Amino acid sequence: MDKIVIEGGARLEGDIEVLGAKNAALPIQCAALLGDGASTLHHVPQLTDVHTMNRLLEGLGCTTASPEGQPRTVRIDPRGVAEGALEAPYERVKTMRASVTVMGPLVARYGRARVSLPGGCAIGARPIDQHLKGLEALGAEVTLEHGYVDVVAPREGLRGSDFVFDKVTVGGTQNLMMAASLARGHSRLENVAREPEVQDLAVFLNKMGAKVRGAGTSVIEIDGVDTLHGIEHAILPDRIEAGTFLVAAAITGGDVLLKNAPVDHMHAVIAKAQEAGVECTVEREGLRVVGPDRLGPIDVTTRPHPGFPTDMQAQIMVLATQADGQSLITETIFENRFMHVPELNRLGADIVVNGNAAVVRGKSAFSGTTVMATDLRASASLVIAGLIAEGRTEVRRIYHVDRGYEALEARLRPLGARIERYHGARG
């Protein structure tokens, strides 16, 4: 098992390119199932989750391939998908919750799907009841048995319907958008997720020939069509990756240009960074981040987009540990997303958790030690914390990092970080 080792104390300086968004790529890979021909995706990040999704699609009968020398371009051809192989097995789904997003396109295009209940990060219960209720509203019959969900469309296919989500869900919104795109008639989805990744999926679907309106608002309306077509599409830049690099630059007192940063999708993160005293300047090539001599305390509450993203909570907590004063971090999305706190405290942080809130007292002097990554964003927070720790920090179980950050250590080194990956580490 790999580990990342950081020698702290280096100031980050230079340029780093923000790559394609994982959370946009995964549902768009699934949406390729809807086309009557191959789709070619560009700016696809090289991540284990992306590779897992490709393997899942191949298991369904798709072919996936990248042109020689273009690893971030992926061609997905669904024409080999057969009715007898419409299953997302436990072996694939257990590591990645986004696998359930094949449900909508499979049911809409092929009439049925069998999907294992999902896995992914251990950050609390993330039920898929809203996905299933929405598909039932479109006329599908849903059965849960032996850890699998079986979804079957009526003989005449899915039908358009009105559906109000009980709570905002990104994956549920995406599943219903894809299913409704091939349903008969009009669908109106209310209380939907507004995330940029939802908007990117809508762009992709409309380029395929779908009729989706309202993505980015709380109501999405869809007029079903008979067929969708394979197309080319470039994945939007990753706002969470950009935010992670923003925090890394800020806490090291650095000066870093985040090339291609999706500034329009980062307002909540940028606002909190500026509140802490970080200089954030939009330039022609992206976002320049300059860390201050002293960081101020902040209060952060995670919210659905356009609020502060839960996927940036662990990283902003590291910034709060370096602020002069007390900060409050409140998590409203997931009930078990403070597992990085004990590991940050091992490094020297002073963080106390009370229910869904964490009181962070700074400024803390970090001392390098061995820490364990527990989930994707927690692992990123531990890596950037190691950048400011005195001495050597070892981050174990970094397969979590590889799910959401392409070659993180290799991309941080040109900025001045003293960071290496070692293979075969225990733990």
Image: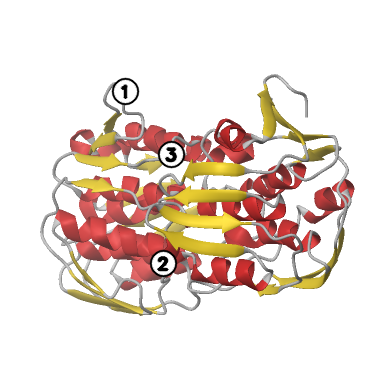
Image location (x, y in percent) of residue 108:
24, 56
User: Which residue lies under the disc numbered 3?
Assistant: 50
What kind of residue is marked 2? Asp
Image location (x, y in percent) of residue 48:
50, 35
Residue 69 - label: 1
What kind of residue is marked 3? Val
Image location (x, y in percent) of residue 386:
76, 42
Q: Quadrant of residue 19?
A: top left
| x 32%, y 50%: residue | 28
Residue in the foreground of this view, choosing between 218 and 233: 233
Within 10 Å of the Cα at label 3, are there few (<14), some (14-19), or many (20+) other Cα atoms? many
Q: Taking 377 as reference, is 71 left or right?
A: left
Q: Secondary structure at mark 2?
A: helix
Q: Secondary structure at mark 1?
A: loop
Any part of residue 219 in sight: yes
Image location (x, y in percent) of residue 424:
70, 19
The Cα–Cα distance between marks 2 and 1, rounded to whole angstroms, is 31 Å
Q: Taking 201 as reference, is 323 left or right?
A: right
User: Which residue lies under the disc numbered 2?
Assistant: 264
| x 79%, y 64%: residue | 323
